[in-house]
Structure formats: C-alpha cells, structure tokens
Image (tube, rainbow, N blue to C red):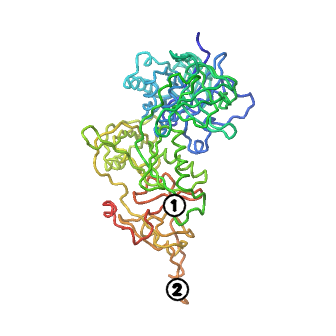
Amino acid sequence: MSLKIRNICTIAHVDHGKTTLVDFLLRQSGTFRLHENVAERLMDSQDLERERGITISAKNAAFNLDDTRVNIVDTPGHSDFGGEVERIMDMVDGAILLVDAAEGPLPQTRFVLEKAIRKGLKIILCVNKVDRPECAETDLVSQSVDKTFDLFVELGANDEQCDFPIVYACAREGWCTSDVNAVPELCSGGGERNLNDLFRLILEVPAPIPVPDPSHDGLKMLVSNISYDNFVGFLALGRLQSGAVKKGQTIYRHGIDGDGQAITEKFQVTRLFRFQGNQQVEAEELSVGDIGLIAGSEKFTIGDTVVADPQITPLERIEVESPTMRMIFSINTSPRSGSEGKAIQSRELKARLESECKSNPALAMEDTQVADQFYLMGRGELQFGIIIETMRREGYEFMVGRPNVLFKKDDKGQVQEPFEKLTLDLPEQYTGDVTNLFQQRKGVLSAYENVTSADATEPRVRLSIEIPTRGVLGTHSDYLTLTRGAGLISSEAVGYRAHCGAISHRLVGCLIADRSGDTTDYALNMLQQRGSLFLGSGVKLYEGMIIGESAKENDLNVNACRPKKLTNIRTTSSDGIVQLNTPKKMSLERCIEWIDDDEWIEITPETIRLRKKILPANQRSVRKADKEQGV
C-alpha cells in the first residue's frame, strides 16, 4: 500500500531561488491562515542567513496536498556547506533542482546534483527566473535545459533519472508551468499564475519504502541532524526508515563514544515533534516514512541510529567528504583580553568547538602542540567566517590564525593538495587583469565563453580556471576590486593533485604599533604616507597590534601615538589642518584573506583587531625573507 507521505528537498547553486520557491510552496498549499503575516525567505531563520542572503544550514518544513503529507528540506547552495546537503539526502526520495534560466547549471549545481544522483533520487528540474529580460529574445531557456541534461549524463545518471520532468518558473512571483510555450503569457501577467504543475510532480515522487530488518520490524531511524530546545533538551532529527515510535516508549540509541567504539544507550521518549509549515508541532506518534524529532537523550550525535530493540542492526553512519582546510583557534592572549567580551579559558573554547563539530559532520577538530590552541578543519573560508561570527555574537573573545589547506600523500609518497575549478562571470574589459591575478597563483585557464545578453550595456565573459585551493585563498576581495564589483565567482572542488610549488600570499608588509597608547591625528598623518591605515584617531593600541598595510614588502614598527609638541611659535605650516585619509575597512572576511602565518585575528563582540603572534618588537623580524624561512 502506498504511503501518503512524500519527502523531497530543494537543491541548486547559490541564489538560484530555492528558499523563495519553498516560501510559495508553503503559502499556496494552505499552510498559513489567510491573513497571517508571513516573512519573506521564511526558511532563512538565522540572523546571518538574512543578513547575507544565503542559506547556511538545511531547514525542514512540511505541508499537505489533499491527503498527502509533504516533508521538504531547503538546503544550502554554497559548496562550503556541502556537508549540510550530504547528510539530508538519506531523508528524501526526490529533489527539486533549480537552475537559473539565463545562467544554466553552475559549479555548485554540479556539486549538489552529483550527491542526489548517487542517492538515486527522482529529480524534478525547475528552470527558474524565466522572466529575465534576456530570456525573452534568445533561446537561453532551452540552452539551460540542454546543459542540465548534459550534466546529468556527465555525472552518470541512469536513463530514468535523465528522463526528468521540467517546469518553467518565476519563484519570486509564485508561478510555474510545464508548457514552455505558456511562459511569455505568464511573464506578461496572464494565465494561471500558480505552482499547481509543480505540486502535481511532487505527488509523483516515490513514496518512502520501509527498510526491512530480518531480525526485527520495529523502529529504525538515522539521526541526520540535532538541535537543542531550552525546555525539551536535545532533539534528534531524521526519517523513520521502519516501524513507528510513540511518546513515552522505551527505545535505544546505537552510537559511538569519544574513542570511536560502538555503544548502546537505553532511554525513554519524552517528546515527539513533526513539522507543520516551518514550525515544530508536538505529536503523539511518528510513523514509518515520516520526518520528525525525538527527545529523551542528551547524548545524540549525527549518524546515530535510534531503534526499538537493541538487537536491531544500526544503519551505516553518515559519511561526508573530508575537510580540505584547517584554521587555528586560540584563547585571547592580547593585553586587551576580557575588556570587551567573555575571555574564555581553553577548556571552554574546546567545548564550544566540539559542540560545533557534533552538529556538523563536515567539521573536525584536532589538538595542537600548544595547550590553549586547537585546529578546526572544514571546507572553506566562508564556513570558518560563519562559525567565527556566530561565536562572536555569543559574546566570546578568542583569536584565529590564517586558514591553511590540508595536504596528503599518494601511494608513491608524493605530496598532493586540493584543487578547485573557479567559474568567473565578469565584464570582458577586466579579463586581462583577472587572468593575470589567478595565473600568478598557479591557475590555468581552461575555458573562455562569451555570455553577453541581448540587453547588456557591456560585453561579459565566463572564465573557467583550475587552481590550487592555496591560490584561491585571499583573492576574493582582489577579484571584486579588479572587476569594480561587477564580477561573480563560484567554485567547486575537483580533488587532490600534485603539489605545484610555492605561491605568494601577501606581497606587502604591515604597519605595527611599537607601543601602547591612543592614536593621534599628528602621528597618523605622517604614517599614511607609508601605507594604508586600518583605523583612525583616538583608537587604543598595544605593542604588536597591526594598524595598517605597508607600501613595501617588509613590516614596519611605527609610533602611532606621537603627540604634536607644543611651542610658543606659531607658523602657517605648523598650525595647518590635518587631513587623514579614510581608514581601510577590514571586515572579518577581509581579515581572514589578508593575514599571514605569523599573525592573529583578535575577535571580540565589539571589535575585530589584527596583531602579530609575537608582540614585542625586539623579538620578531620585520623582513619578509626571514618570515618565509621561519626566523
């Protein structure tokens, strides 16, 4: 008998409309009351998600279509958060793949689609943004479909998966159609502007099939995510692969301990929840195929199997791709420690990082040779930046170092490093400067495509560059500067290849405060001729704090607190108005890109500072050559 449950997810490249589409699916399915006030991008519930306009973590929701319950998961599109995509694939049977009608499938489309094809999901292609002006006068829509089909074949999809259904949509206006010839009328405001064709295809997704166990037919659920409620405690999220579970029932958790050994824990179900819209609603029972949450244990970890009987064989634990980068986290050892936030001890920092790793299997943590410093391993600068900003908003004070890639050796003992394929969309006039930027970092141009639209004011091109991950670090701001903010960039991992030699990171040194005190206009006016300043007048300094970027390759210890000496002589030159240049704004992301291996970023709830790891000026070299040799 077919189950009246459908489990699906949305997958796409960044900013191709996943979250907006889910909003309208929930609205048009009657999930909300007629006059209920519903926020835009409802699924982006975190502050950082709304501020940045991206999805960071996977979100669950549910709606009803007649007598069928549809569980839907909104997934991130950025490859740095690929672990979120990988771990929810076991919960769903189908996926809505969104592709921009004008841009076609982009690198991160490939990344998430490959995961869906490997899991054997039924895929619905949604060609979104068909209302873009350039689509009306060209055949970009059909080209996007053709490119997507080619991508399916390239990724090894079977015949059934390649025969995917298609809808053409404008998610921001809440309509779609399976008839491409109806698109012009719908774009002009006519026709039936709704998502009925997509609803019909969702109902055609296969119903969840119970996973039988020869030893027992009771409850079996793989924990795909965990959350915390102040009143309920820890909650395990997953799909019931078989059986059912009731409130108050005694069940078991198959997990692993800190040493990686298998353990079994007995506990009682205290609360059960399922989703209605984007809200959790309490339930008395969850049945096979449904996606819900179970409370009752304080030791849930992602990858555990929850079962009705300890003799039931646990499911295979969730495995995600290994991290490719690591970043060092340290307690705050600066002279200003504790003045602006909570100065934490090493055990508190370790516990906070461990909790982050427990909730995200794409992260890992290692101790270092220093007791109060720890390595956090992940997939990219954006992922690290989100974790740092989250901890900062929680009131923590700490320091982080420069991210570094993780090397490994092949069977012959040769060092290998991770590579990425960059896709750059930019105005044609900046092509020379951009290619020069990445070629200096061992990048190789593999494709050059003209993507100028019919109504464009200037010609645009799309470049594909294969480059070591080391070469990508620190280039995002430079790329935006070279393209005057008009360039788009995305990337995908392409595996490990032979180490390609030394890559220069930062070609200039920095201006370093040689004493404590407050900055003065008089001192900064002279120093701004030596480079670019990061701060203005009246800022408290300490020795070893970085105040700017030097114009030359070596570091420079400077006095930024020098006052103007008073005299009884007045002249036109001595009494002139001091005009300081606007300080160069250093955001957290820019700091992560900019710092070198001998520097820290000091993170506090109020301020982000840059400093040298060794503060006293007489204990460190300012020469770039000495730093490269480890002197």
The three-letter amino acid code for the residue at tag 1 is: Arg
Residue at 35%, 59% in the rendered image: 507
Q: Would you place residue 386 above or below residue 627 in this image?
A: above
Horizontal side, residue 41 vs residue 581: left or right? right
Closer to the camera: disc 2 or disc 1? 1
Quadrant location, the C terminus: bottom left
Horizontal side, residue 146 vs residue 397: left or right? left
Residue closer to the observer: 273 or 367: 367
Q: Would you place residue 538 above or below residue 37 in this image?
A: below
Residue 557: image location, x then y, percent: 42, 71
Residue closer to the observer: 91 or 13: 91
Q: Secondary structure at mark 2?
A: loop
Residue that badge 2 annotates:
571
The three-letter amino acid code for the residue at tag 2 is: Thr
Residue that badge 1 annotates:
609
- Residue at the far bottom in the pictured view: 568
Q: Secondary structure at mark 1?
A: strand
Quadrant location, the N terminus: top right
Residue closer to the observer: 545 or 34: 545
